[in-house]
Amino acid sequence: MNPAAAELNRRLQERMLYPDGLAACFEHVSKSLGYALTIYDTKGFTFKDASLRASFEPYAMHTHPFCSMVKKNWHNTKRCIVNRKYSVRKAATEQRSFYGKCYMGVEEIVFPVVHGGETIAVVFLGQFGARDQKDLEWISGKAEQYQVKQEVLLDIYNNIAMKLDETIIEDLLKVILMISQFIVLAYQSTLLSSQINDNIELPVAETSLSRAQAVAKLAMERVQSTYHETFSLTTIARHCNCSTGYVSRCFSQVFGMSLVKYVNQIRVQHAKSLLGATTLSITEIALSLGFNDTNYFSKVFKSIAGTSPVAYRRRE
């Protein structure tokens, strides 16, 4: 094998190392191919591994230039959250892909990643637009309606919106398949790790474990849909039709962390995106994520991110 071939082979092997291969896949899609990529973990599996979380974190929210411009207005951030929740729920429950337009006029492909009959993630891939007069008038009108600078927003739109036509459909399908396969591999890896850990621990009755998994999954889904509201263990327990003590034990058993820690991790994950992509104040971000006390939000943020919200924003 000549030196060039040997070097190529070595680099290829490096790119396939997990989770480096996962990060390389996402980076290729977003930077090399130029797609706006956002991934929502609907099973909570990325929180089980720090390196895996690091691979997914840059793609956890819509922080692309167009979205970031829109979200400079706090009320628009709330609209985006509602819009995103609806799309995630639709793709996850119906387990089918769809092509749609957000309330501001940008178009995306939304597709679920399904494994073993369950939706483990929902992916947004864009951003598309016809860039014709009708589209420009729509976005201009929405910018005026939602108090966003028209000229700046239209300029961003013209720069980032890809025209969807038949020539790129096959390539798009390949990209979707690639992303899905990498996410499934990541999920399978966490399952394997969990199974290994379970074999080390004391055996649990199958019916008990199945019940615990079902309750933990319900609790996780509830947290993911209400993380921006005031945290209430009683409300989550009522949603799962069990006691607060039982839902806490089930969640800790299945996911290896408390419910409070999980909701705070999700909140900090979204806070990082908002700090980097918007000009919202620390107080506005704290309130938008369900914190009633800015000082407590800063304390939680520092305990998870290792730095204060202000320092994190300066660094970004």
Image (spheres, rainbow, N blue to C red):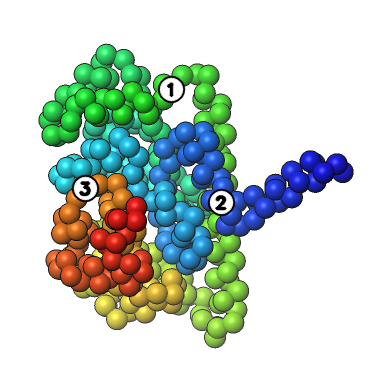
**Mark 1 closeness class: few <14, some 14–19, many ≥20 residues within 10 Å:** some
* Numbered disc 1: secondary structure: loop
Tag 1: amino acid: Leu
Is tag 2's residue or tag 1's residue first in the polypeptide sequence? Answer: 2
What residue is rendered at 28% in x and 41% in y? Answer: 68
- Above or below 207: residue 279: above
What residue is rendered at 40% in x and 40% in y? Answer: 124
Q: Quadrant of the N terminus?
A: top right
Tag 2: amino acid: Leu
**Residue 83 in sight in this render:** no
Would residue 265 be found to the left or right of residue 35 on screen? Answer: left
**CA–CA distance in space, label 2 to label 1:** 26 Å
Expressed as whole percent of the image width and height from the top left, the position of residue 194 reads 54, 71
- Above or below 116: residue 174: above
- Tell me where residue 284 sits by quadrant: bottom left
* Numbered disc 2: secondary structure: helix
Q: Nearer the viewer, mark 2 or mark 1?
A: 2
Residue tagged 1 = 164
Q: Nearer the viewer, mark 3 or mark 2?
A: 3
The disc placed on residue 22 is 2
The disc placed on residue 279 is 3
Expressed as whole percent of the image width and height from the top left, the position of residue 169 reads 51, 25
**Mark 2 closeness class: few <14, some 14–19, many ≥20 residues within 10 Å:** many
